[in-house]
Image: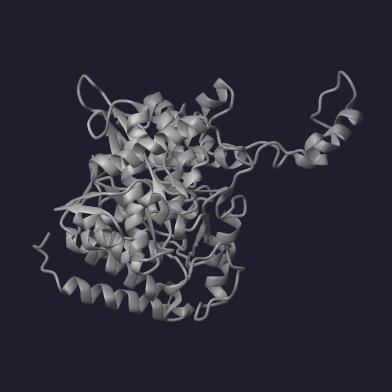
Amino acid sequence: MTDTAVEPTRERRGRPGGGRDARIAARQAAAHAAGAPFLTRALKPFEVLDEEGLSLIEHNADTILEEVGIIFRGDPEALKMLKDAGADVEGELVKFPRGMCRQIVQASAPRIYTQHARNPDRSVQIGDPYTVLAPNYGSPFVRDLDNGRRYGTLEDFRNLVKLAYMTPHLHHSGGTVCEPVDVPVNKRHLDMVYSHIRWSDKPFMGSVTHPDRAKDSVELAKIAFSDQGADYLDDHTVITSLINANSPLVWDASMLGAARVYAEANQATLITPFILAGAMSPVTVAGTCAQTLAEALAGMAFVQLVHPGAPVILGSFASSISMQSGAPTFGTPEPALVLYVMAALARRLGVPFRSGGNLCAAKTADAQAAYESAATFIPTILAGTNFVLHAAGWLEGGLAVGYEKFILDLDQCGMAGVFVKGVDLSENGQALDAIRENGPGIHFLGNSHTLANFESAFYRSATADNNSFEQWLEDGALESPQRANKIWKRMLAEYEAPPIDPGIDEALNEYITKRKAAFPDSDV
């Protein structure tokens, strides 16, 4: 069973109360007062194709599934499941009768679901008309003004989790916000999932690099929510995890295995073809969309066969490449068109949609980073994307996450939160009384309407400098990355961890210690 509404706030059993915990909770509530646990869009999505165009893409996707097929690599159980459902299986190549995948997905996949957070006030709705913003994912490198570019560490990971927790402009803690390469590969997932649970109380993602790591993620989540009952995860989704296709037209054993683990536990998966058009799909927008839809339909159908009703999100990560060098490019118009089309296709299918973010190929938080990120993020919002990964911190085509870029992106996320509310047509929004009161030729600075609304009238940027040139000079002539540098340091200095039941924390650490002991440090 999946939920379609956020549950009312309630007291959680075992949570410490009073004293320091009460003060921390009060400060955290105040810090998030300006934001909401997720965005509710009042604006209609922007469309770039009509009914005929969208139907053509869907027809082409079914043609790919029927005539070309998808490889399901290294997973005999998946092949048997698909064959039993009516697919044509030849070795590892699976071909689907026209409409089969769509029928399976539409029969059971939820249109909207709740991902429950450890703090019920942070639970999010995923699906229309909601948008959930999550931070960067997957970068092996980190960058800041003080230390430059370097491999990510567990300390960096924790810092980024804390920053995502403290801002009201991100609604989700994310997953692999950076790779902590100072921890062995076979153990770091334990530290990452624990960091999300302990240093934040927002929703989080699990590990997908191996089915056993997905199982560990589920077990840690069971412990984290054990104060809600031993079977809480059976009918409450608390993890949403990223499952990438190996484009073109391949699902591999690692991703299939992780997807199966989460589906069996009724946890959500982002079924996402990761495509650099021209290398992993055709160079055209329509061709990339058809292939993306085919791959995603096959993956979502597999999940529904494993566990009908398990939440799935249709994901699309499509960018272009330089046809001269082969390097990934971001902020170009063609991927924006893919994003708009795929969002519409997800709505027609009846499942949530994931795409976009603040993406760029820039190496630092410079002008290129700003305009490429804006060229991705604006279509993300206008398309009506439901789950936005990489909303903050992305640099260098995803190879790096930047502390300063993280802060600058948060400002854009905050602006999006205002924009999606649309135009206020209430009596206060119309402001006719203010115009009557003022009359012609008189400024509005002293108007009673202005005085009543000035604190919330306009979005206030935390990073932009709007002072005079002289004041800017007097303040040190800081450019935006330098201002962002000061902000993230101040945020970390002011960070206080959310409360957690000591017994739950002890159980989490006992599980992690036991699991780590099963692997020698030399193992990778």
Q: Nearer the viewer, residue 496 or 437?
A: 437
At x 40% / y 77%, what residue is drawn?
504
Count of picture labels: 0
Q: Is residue 107 left or right of residue 208?
A: right
| Image quadrant in which the C terminus is located | bottom left
Residue sitting nearer the eye, 452 or 321: 321
Relative to 96, is 457 on the left or the right? right
Position in image of residue 76 (x %, y %): 17, 61
Residue 210: tell me if it is visible: no
| Residue sitting at x 59%, y 67% | 7
Residue 14: percent from left, percent from top: 49, 81
Quadrant assignment, res 309: bottom left
Residue name at image x 47 percent, y 50 percent: 352
Question: Can residue 467 be seen from the camera position used here?
Answer: yes
In the rendered structure, the answer to whether residue 479 lies left or right of residue 30 reads left
Above or below: residue 497 compared with residue 461: below
Residue occupying the point 29% across, 44% down: 65
The colour scheme used here is one colour
Along the line of sight, the residue nearer the viewer: 290 or 421 = 290
Q: Is residue 487 above or below residue 86?
A: above
Looking at the picture, how far across and down is residue 518, in whole percent? 15, 73
The percent position of residue 459, horizontal first and vertical second, equals: 62, 37
